[in-house]
Amino acid sequence: MAGTFETVGVVGLGTMGAGIAEVFARAGLTVIGVEADPAALERGRGHLEGSTGRALARGKLTEAERAEILGRVSFTTSLEDLADADLVIEAIPEVMDYKRALFTDLDRVCKPSAVLATNTSSLSVTAIAATTTRPGRVIGMHFFNPAPVMKLVEVVRTVTTDDGLAGEVADLARRLGKTPVTVGDRAGFVVNRLLLAYLNHAAALLENGLAGRDDIDAAMKLGAGFPMGPFALLDLIGLDTSYEICEVLFRETRDRRHAPAPILRELVTAGRLGRKSGEGFHCAEEPQSPSPHEKPSAASVAVLGEGAEEFSARLSGAGFKIVDPEGAELVLALSHTPVVERAVRLPHPDRLVGLHLVGDQVAEVASTVLTSPDTARVAHGLLRILGRTPVPCKDRAEFVVDALLYPYLNDAVRMYESGYASIEDIDTAMKLGCGYPAGPFETLDRLGLETVRDGLRALYAEYREPSFAPAPLLDQLVTAGVRSIRDLTP
């Protein structure tokens, strides 16, 4: 049972490793922290003292509790000091050769009953276990940063993992106050497999000029309700880390969505790694561009498409004159169909923009090749008056939010369809691991299976990307008239 884990070794005391050591110490376990040299050891001690010090300052710990936590952790530069540990977890850099070499040493040092765990976020646990004489006692235990705060732990079993060990480690995670999700050994597991495909897709859309960096970030944060935009999150994770995870995913899946976007490679090569280097997609000292709030000069507006009457009423209430499209200074097309198809039917196609209202805060404004800059500017000002953040983009299928959101949901359906993880576990992993307000299946049910299926079909027709084709299960559910994918859950 998990109660047999009383002494834990943590190898690698960077931000993540020190956080993991803190988590074990907070739960009352004896912790042995190991680093390569005295300087790194002192940095690790500093991470632990700094984290607990911040918790003390915020009233999350008392002085006595902090002293107890720190007192449970000892520090060493010798792996030999792990000889009596019940479990050893590594948090060293994501380089397979480093991890395999470490596990060879741990196999020699640690007692036969000890469990050897890796905190890898994407590498093969099976390949790491194969370097030892005890592959049945090797397991993945993937924490999320910051470890003392994030509630999720992915417990990764392999085909050689001893029966019952994954359950024991999951029980240990619960003892730590975490929520475990137990999965098999596939690149990226649940969270990174879904998250990195989405982030990489965002980088590709930026590179293709669909929309600007800040606009995409705003769209996904304010429109989709994600805690951070994709480029802010890539900078936080580290572009080098993200690039390497994408490489691992691509080597396993050969899915083009996992092939790192060229802009990631360029930024990493240039040393722009995100927050850790001071600049990535964003720069630390970058000024924010002020958003104009002046009332647009256009007084006459026409609205086309589904929901036109409702939106026209709001415009009228804001003081705009609603007129026929032929006499309008600005024409707004509420549509997911190619906006240019509506534009070419108007006497003044330069006066039309596409409009997609996302949630309560965002409006995507799609300009065609015919839209004049003045028209786009006026539309942005109008939307600000209505209290929405305008997101300018090109006239492409599903614009920005849905173009990023629907493939992510499709990936989740494929993951479930393959039998890799349950609907509940996938939703739990994405909520706890990424801080999302809802899991992908909760989001899918909210949006509607048919809506997402049809959106994916439009994306596939536009981009010809095989992974955008609706998952067979999603197609079958819509055809069968199933309204909620959760109806599949016993």
Image: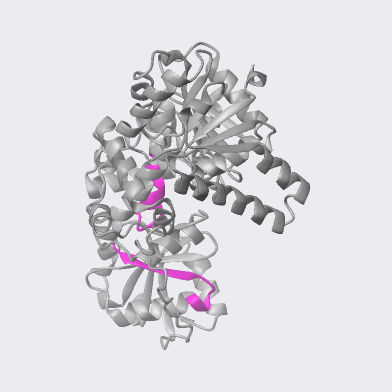
Q: Residue at x 51, y 76 (%)?
A: 315
Which residue is at the front of the view, 12 or 262?
Answer: 12
The magenta stretch spans residue 404: yes
Q: Quadrant of the C terminus?
A: top right
- Where 81 falls versus 63 (above or below)? above
Q: Residue at x 29, y 56 (%)?
A: 205
Locate residue 480: give its quadrant: top left
Question: Where residue 118 sits in the image (x, y, percent)?
Answer: 45, 30
Locate residue 196: give its quadrant: top left
Q: Quadrant of the N terminus?
A: top right
Q: Spot the residue most to the bottom.
A: 297
Q: Residue at x 43, y 40 (%)?
A: 450
Let me know if residue 422 appears in the view. no
Q: How is the image coloured?
A: one colour
Q: Spot the residue most to the top.
A: 163
Question: Where residue 320 sits in the image (x, y, percent)?
Answer: 49, 82
Q: Residue 154 vs residue 393: left or right?
A: right
Let me know if residue 10 appears in the view. yes
The magenta stretch spans residue 328: no
- Where 89 falls versus 38 (above or below)? above
- Where 431 falls versus 214 (above or below)? above
Span highlighted in magenta in the image: 384-410
Which residue is at the front of the view, 407 or 251?
Answer: 251
Locate residue 467: give its quadrant: top left
Question: Where residue 113 sits in the image (x, y, percent)?
Answer: 53, 13
Question: Where residue 87 sits in the image (x, y, percent)?
Answer: 55, 24
- Where 414 falls versus 264 (above or below)? above
Which residue is at the front of the view, 207 or 176?
Answer: 176
